[in-house]
Image (cartoon, rainbow, N blue to C red):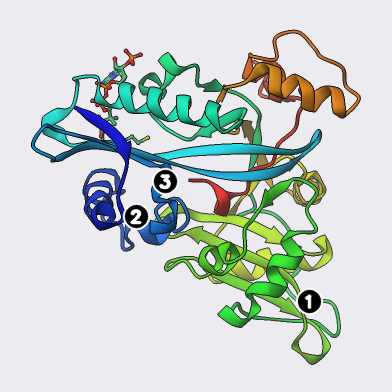
Amino acid sequence: MQIASITPDRHAEFLAIVNAEIRPDRAKTHAWDDFPLILSPLNAEWTLIATSPEGEIMAGLACLIREYTTSCGKIPLAGVGSVVTKPEFQGQGLSSALQNALLAKLKGKNVPLAVLWTDQPEIYAGRGFVPAGWELHIDFAGATLDESFPPGFQVRDFNGSDAATVQALYDGHQLRTLRLPGDAEKLYGMPGTRGLVAVGEGDVVLAAVFCGKGADFPEYVAEWSGPVGLVLPLLGEARRREWAHQVLVPPGGNQLAERLIARGASSFACPGGYWAVLQPEGLSRYLQAAGIGSPGNVDDPAVLLGHVDKNGNPVMGPVTIGVWGLDSV
Ligand SMILES: CC(C)(COP(=O)(O)OP(=O)(O)OC[C@H]1O[C@@H](n2cnc3c(N)ncnc32)[C@H](O)[C@@H]1OP(=O)(O)O)[C@@H](O)C(=O)NCCC(=O)NCCS
């Protein structure tokens, strides 16, 4: 077996395997529609495959590296996804070997943290991935939301020419991914993702919500931006159209969460993914630079990033990171 980054000529072959093995039932979109950045050919260096002596792709995985604005400054983070082994090669340690190879490569690039989302945590536990951080899931189906917009504002569908403006609104979030040029157009243009914008005089876009992420996050608002006073009626419109009745609120989105809960929405907190600390020393330096000093157990993601306690309440750690739905991989 050989493990290496995929070469551009074989990228489509890997995508076909991911699409065959990891899609939700009856998905109307392809894997590369819902995950356009991690599965882009531009990300080939961070797409590892295990090949047989005959050259067949047996298994693979990918990660997307971006910097995040955190409570301790900008920190590079690797989102791991598209983890797949062809059925006939499963149970032979291929995915373990690929995960180990990826984490070793990330350490070499000074990426101190990795995160993934899965309903099979046992596949990754051996590499130190544990639940950590938190996110709120808010159901606004029964909430009292404004039926109309404040005077001077109205709603319309998002269109591709709004991408740069909406990205600038997203950049107003304190905790977010630092997207690279071109990322926003791909994320906001994902097939199956429906956006609504609130516009003021001159059709200036002032707020936005995005529903779904292709076949991922059905009936969820996966991202919102702009003043809460405009986001609330946008959520009302998304609900009226039956596009979404839940919203994913990462750390930093508390203002919207509080307003929704005050209007009768229900909520629960759950871990913000499965996290692994790849470089405790590197993270200590970020904490020291942020004036936090170096708490013990920097290598424990649940201590570092916080967690959800046994009563279902978020507990903060020294580092807070917000991953928005559209940025998950
Ligand atoms: C999940 C998947 C990638 C695992 O690939 P694999 O090559 O068979 O995995 P490995 O043999 O390397 O096993 C990886 C780890 O998972 C554990 N594992 C594998 N299958 C398991 C199972 N059914 N139940 C519990 N643990 C399991 C192994 O014990 C191993 O743990 P260790 O490394 O700590 O010893 C493969 O089953 C697959 O492609 N499934 C369909 C696509 C999918 O679900 N991808 C994951 C999306 S999050």
User: Which quarter of the figure has residue 54?
Assistant: top left
Look at the picture and state if 31 lies above or below 236. Answer: above
Residue under label 1: 149
Q: Is residue 318 visible?
A: no
Between 187 and 106, the one nearer to me in the picture: 106
Amino acid type at circle 2 is Ala
The CB of the residue at mark 1 lies under 8 Å from ligand 1: no
Q: Earlier in the sequence, mark 1 or mark 3?
A: 3
Residue under label 3: 45
Q: Is residue 56 visible?
A: yes
The answer to whether mark 1 and mark 2 are in CB contact below 8 A is no
Helix, strand or loop under label 1: loop
* Cα–Cα gap, marks 1 and 2: 36 Å
Where in the figure is residue 142, as x and y percent of width and height?
64, 53
Q: Where does ligand 1 appear, by image quarter?
A: top left
Amino acid type at circle 3 is Glu
Between 300 and 245, the one nearer to me in the picture: 300
Q: Is residue 111 left or right of residue 36?
A: right
Where in the figure is residue 204, as x and y percent of width and height?
77, 83
Residue located at (54% from left, 32% from top): 115
